[in-house]
Amino acid sequence: MTASRRSRWVLPVLAVLVIAGAYAGWRYYGGGKSEQAANKPRSGPPPIAVKLAAAEKSDFPIYLNGLGTVQGFNTVVVRTRVDGQIDKIAFKEGQVVKEGDLLAQIDPRPFQASLDQAKAKKAQDEANIANANLDLQRFTKLGEFATKQQTDTQRSTVQQLTAQIAADDAAISNAQTQLDYTTVKAPIAGVVGFRQVDQGNIVNAATQTGIVTIAQVEPIAVIFTAPEQQLVDISAALKAHPLKVIALSTDGKRNLSEGTLAVINNQVDTTSGTIRLKATFDNKDHVLWPGLSISTRLLVTTLKDAVVIPDDAVEHGADGLYAFAVGADNKAEMKKIKVGSSTDGRTVVESGLAAGERLIVAGQYKVQPGSVVSSAVATSDATSAKAP
């Protein structure tokens, strides 16, 4: 093949190769990529992961929270009523005693001697009156041989001795009472504290120091306060039915016992603007102890069929309170609400929401009105607190 003929077909082939390479580069660097992007469907921002809970309709208890102090239902300082030496201490500190149990024994010998003396005096006077009655009978039988003065005098003597017998009976009763006082018994059932005297000590009825203190713990009382503004509602509710009082630990985390409201004090404390209340508890397990500080919850009333939501669903805005509700399309909607009482992580909604609506309770900081939320991670945050 000659050079001229070879050049005639080489040049077109080279031109075709150059054009093909240029087209491939265009497809790779620009044209092809744009075409691929044009064919790909466009998408918006991903759904926002939140936690949901439903508004519920249920009975909602209205509690009045306060602080209280436990005290014995009855507290007695056991003191001696006679003077003498303690022969025996019959209780152990911290012991639970019943009414009438022996606590201490005081030396009874001086009081037994006084009782014996009073009984002897009565026996003597009974002998005297017996003789006086015989003389009166003789004077009466003598008739006109005995003067009227003698008869009247003898009758007066009999009457005097009769009165003396009555005085002797009183002296015996007093001596017996003093002897009984030497046996010191528990006036009430309860728990005894630290003893104030030891065996062998001399006790005196005039001293203020007692032998021991007894506190009644079954039942037991709790004194707590409430704002004076609640007095009308509490009084009205108490007239209708007994009011339940719950005793909790001071941190409010542990339920200690349940009792009933017993007394509303007869006056308001003007310095603090509070009213003192007294509740009683059976306290069979002795979990409440005199002097213990506790938190109290007084059940004033129960709202029937109230719309209740978790506290975490309530948000604070410039225009007031609101909550994010989520519709069937998983889009968030801001709803203004008006709330009432709140207890145990639940809040009553007075207006703005209906039962059954799904509400955002976690992740609100990422949500705007109209935002799409992820229903895949939505969970029901059912409240555990129930109305009693």
Image: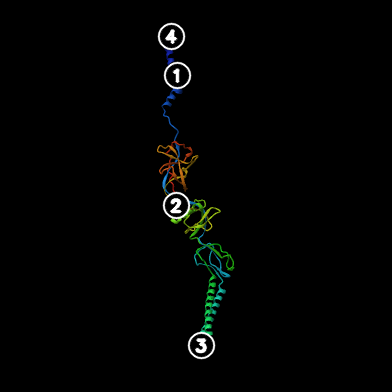
Q: Badge 2 is on which residue?
A: 301
**How far apart are the alpha carbons under marks 1 and 3?**
170 Å
Q: Residues within 10 Å of mark 2 (few under 14, many from 20)?
A: some
| Among the two numbered marks 4 and 3 on one chain, the one whose residue lies closer to the N terminus | 4
Closer to viewer: mark 4 or mark 2: 2
Q: CA distance from mark 2 to mark 1?
A: 86 Å
Is residue 273 placed above or below 330 in the rendered structure?
below
Q: In front of the other: label 2 or label 1?
A: 2
Residue 167 in percent (x, y) is at 53, 77
Q: Quadrant of residue 199?
A: bottom right
Establish if 213 lies above or below 314: below
Mark 1 vs mark 3: which is more N-terminal? Answer: 1
In the rendered image, residue 80, in percent from the top left (x then y), is placed at 56, 68
Q: For the residues marked 4 and 2, what is the alpha-carbon distance in whole angstroms?
A: 114 Å
**Residue tagged by mark 3?**
139
Q: Specify how the rendered protein is coloured.
A: rainbow
Q: Are marks 4 and 3 in contact (CB under 8 Å)?
A: no
**Viewer-nearest of discs 4 and 1:** 1
| Kind of residue indicated by mark 4 | Ser
Residue 63 visible from this viewpoint:
yes
Q: Amino acid at mark 3?
A: Phe
N-terminal of the pair, mark 4 or mark 1, is 4
Check disc 4 and report the residue beneath it.
4
Q: Quadrant of residue 181?
A: bottom right
C-beta proximity under 8 Å, tags 1 and 3 = no
